[in-house]
Image (spheres, rainbow, N blue to C red):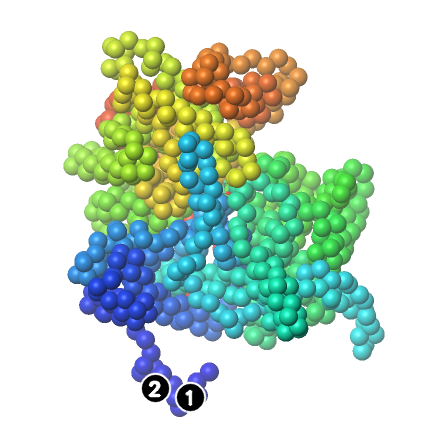
Amino acid sequence: SIPEGQREAWKKHSVQGFTTKDQFEDETVRHIETTLARSLFNCDELAAYSGAALAFRDRLIIEWNKTQQRQTFADQKRVYYLSLEFLMGRALDNAMLNVGLKDVARAGLKDLGFRIEDVISQEHDAALGNGGLGRLAACFLDSMATLNYPAWGYGLRYRYGIFKQEIVDGYQVEVPDYWLDFNPWEFPRHDITVDIQFYGYVRKEKDEDGKTVTIWEGGEIVDAVAYDVPIPGYGTATTNNLRLWSSKASKGEFDFQKFNSGEYEGSVGDQQRAETISAVLYPNDNLERGKELRLKQQYFWCAASLFDIVRRFKKTKKPWSKFSDMVAIQLNDTHPTLAIVEMQRILVDIEGLDWAEAWSIVQGTFSYANHTVMPEALEKWSVPLMQNLLPRHLQIIYEVNSQFLQYVEKTFPKDRDMLRRVSIIEESQPKMVRMAYLATIGSHKVNGVAELHSDLIKTTIFKDFVTIYGPDKFTNVTNGITPRRWLHQANPKLSELIASKLGGYDFLTDLTKLNKLEHFLDDADFKKEWQEIKYANKVRLAQHIKDTTGVSVNPKALFDIQVKRIHEYKRQQLNILGVIHRYLTIKAMSPEERKKLAPRVSIFGGKAAPGYWMAKTVIHLVCSVGEVVNNDKDIGDLLKVIYIEDYNVSKAEIITPASDISEHISTAGTEASGTSNMKFVLNGGLIIGTCDGANIEITREIGESNIFLFGNLAEDVEDLRHAHTYGDFQLDPDLNKVFEAIKSGRFGDAGRFSALCNSIIEHGDYYLVSDDFNSYVKTHELVDEAYKDQEAWLEKCITSVARMGFFSSDRCIQEYAEMIWNVEPLPPKE
Ligand code: Z2T
């Protein structure tokens, strides 16, 4: 650091962030003219975006620096949030709002000849995630910074985020998402590089004191390079850090010898192999396929993050016994479970602690959040694969398992089968490492993400572990969403209206303040404005639909939206089959009956994993139905069916505020929480849903009369499935008619949909589409009825928004901080 005598000079020249419109323009133009080497003669919207982004980046990094210094000197516990996915979306709008300078920027950009909305929409989404799990991580970063928690995120800097989806002739086509061309939000830290080892062998050796030490060597080394992304809190100077690791051929390893001896291709090959590790995000939501490269990604990221965390701790010169007083590490699902093993390896093999002491530090440090009970999403790694890639880690896993099983055997001597059931190693062919068990054993707390889900994990996948550890190790933290992005940023007009009634924007940092809105249920002007805002949001979405699909939809129609990853358990097939039923019903209606019907727009959006054929078929069915219905003159505005291409965070910001009703219709017991349900209600849309995930708690908060619930309950699912398999399966008669229409070729070549139809008709209807069909259709009729009474509908919407306070990710982060991490906020000094 700079010597005492020179610090005055530093302070004098230290950069101040802009605060006025003039300063903003200065900074923006300076960046455009120098950093970007452009002039007023060739400054397009992209250049304006770049300049504004760089101006804001400067501001963020000033606060980032101060925050990091403060956190270092504060000498208190920090949180590290390890997630393979951070679905951040765009940063500029968020940065403007969080630092409170959006109006300044709007005025400044106007001076310079630009509309702020056009500038904002130039930004490429940071799409380093699949769906709910990745977006949750992004909401948590926002809340942790806003609440002034000293917290870092750790993830991978994928060169390609989630693919872009194009719909070509009604089919999904995947296009790579190369997003790093110009990314002003990251700071490469070439000085922060960690050597990561793979493969090799393990040997034992005696040290000077005659103690046996374990050495892992002879492997191949890849470098992890840190890229830092500043995370500004809302209305606070706290600016936290998201550190993303990028893989690079190791300086030491990158074979200069090969290079010099003319084996240029070989040496380039090594380099490419190294860079492959962080090249691409695996595009599966709720599915694990056990690929070696994925395991490499996981270890690469865990080892780099752990090295970084341990290095930071060691600078404090505190004894190891204080580690878990200074460090809390949160595992976002099992993807970072190797961090547990890596930590034990560092403590035992490198730092020389004894096993038991090390293991108690590990357990005190880690906590694990489970996000699914779906068996195909539970991570299992083949033992031979791990033996080859991470030989020392496999040894450690076996040792952890052996000690754990000894304890279980001693404590439950009568239950012989228990050992087989709870073993980290599944005795299959090949043997498999059960990551959820390892994560549970290595953590002090395990949580589910909504009440039903947290109850379910205790009675299903972790039943035996509740017996072994007692129920207190398991807890619930219901998910939440950040009201900054999902209300203030996505729906500025509604946010403004609410602020005008509540006397300011305090609700954005204490969402329970929304409950005061219930006092305005008789305020006719307020309600009119509310309705006008919803209408304007629908007009905006209708415009987007027109621009991207060419289809005109009537913004006065009821907008019925289902946007989320395409998955059989989320049951988009139930939705589209219901839409076909509606179509057939309308076709059979007399003109008088049709007059009574509320026109509808059925809107779908979401990506299918590239290898998930059934999900792709669902997309194709939606598009095919749309093709027929939208061109049926006889139907007109009564029904339109739309597929919105490439659903992502920035699209969600347009779609969410525009719903009248949205669909959250998973088979009961399969959707751990869901978070878009929260976003839609917070934006004044009602929801139709099953008794699943957070829908149940949303119902409890907003009241049963404000939600359209239908379908079988989680507790009955098992029996129903059993009945399908062993009893005689009765297809719902209305659903049968829908299948008949599909089979008749009315929506194009029926052969394309046969696998989808047969999964329900012939192959056991695992997701209970038929069992819930009647209840679903009837509930949609209730929706139609309710929508006719616009006054009552509006009242339901406002009441619901007023009661959504619980679902702020701020509440959620506070629960993690108090019940799991045991960390305190560190507010900036004013
Ligand atoms: C994911 O998005 C979710 C769970 C996963 O389990 C994996 C992915 Cl990629 C391994 C989702 C859940 O499906 C959803 O219910 C939940 O709201 C979300 O995580 C956040 O907890």
Residue 301, placed above or below residue 479? below
Q: Label 2: few (<14), some or many (≥20) within 10 Å?
A: few
Q: Is residue 192 left or right of residue 16?
A: right
- Which residue ends up furthest to the bottom in the rendered image? 5
Identified at 48% across, 35% down, the residue is 566
Q: Label for residue 9?
A: 2
Query: At which x and y percent is residue 378?
Result: 62, 42
Q: CA distance from mark 2 to mark 1?
A: 10 Å
Say if residue 184 shows up in the picture. Answer: yes
What's under tag 1, amino acid-wise? Answer: Glu
Most foreground residue, 719 or 131: 131
Q: Label for residue 4?
A: 1
Query: At which x and y percent is residue 67?
Result: 41, 68
Report which quarter residue 548 is drawn in: top left
Most foreground residue, 636 or 672: 636
- Dot 1 falls on a residue whose secondary structure is helix
Q: Is residue 442 left or right of residue 584?
A: right
Identified at 50% across, 33% down, the residue is 616
Q: Which quadrant is the C terminus positioned in?
A: bottom left
Most foreground residue, 754 or 133: 754
- Which residue ends up furthest to the front in the rendered image? 262
Q: Label for residue 118?
A: none
Residue 437, placed above or below residue 182? above
Query: At which x and y percent is residue 707?
Result: 38, 29
- Dot 2 falls on a residue whose secondary structure is helix
What's under tag 2, amino acid-wise? Answer: Ala
Identified at 42% across, 20% down, the residue is 747
Which comes sooner in the sequence, label 2 or label 1? 1
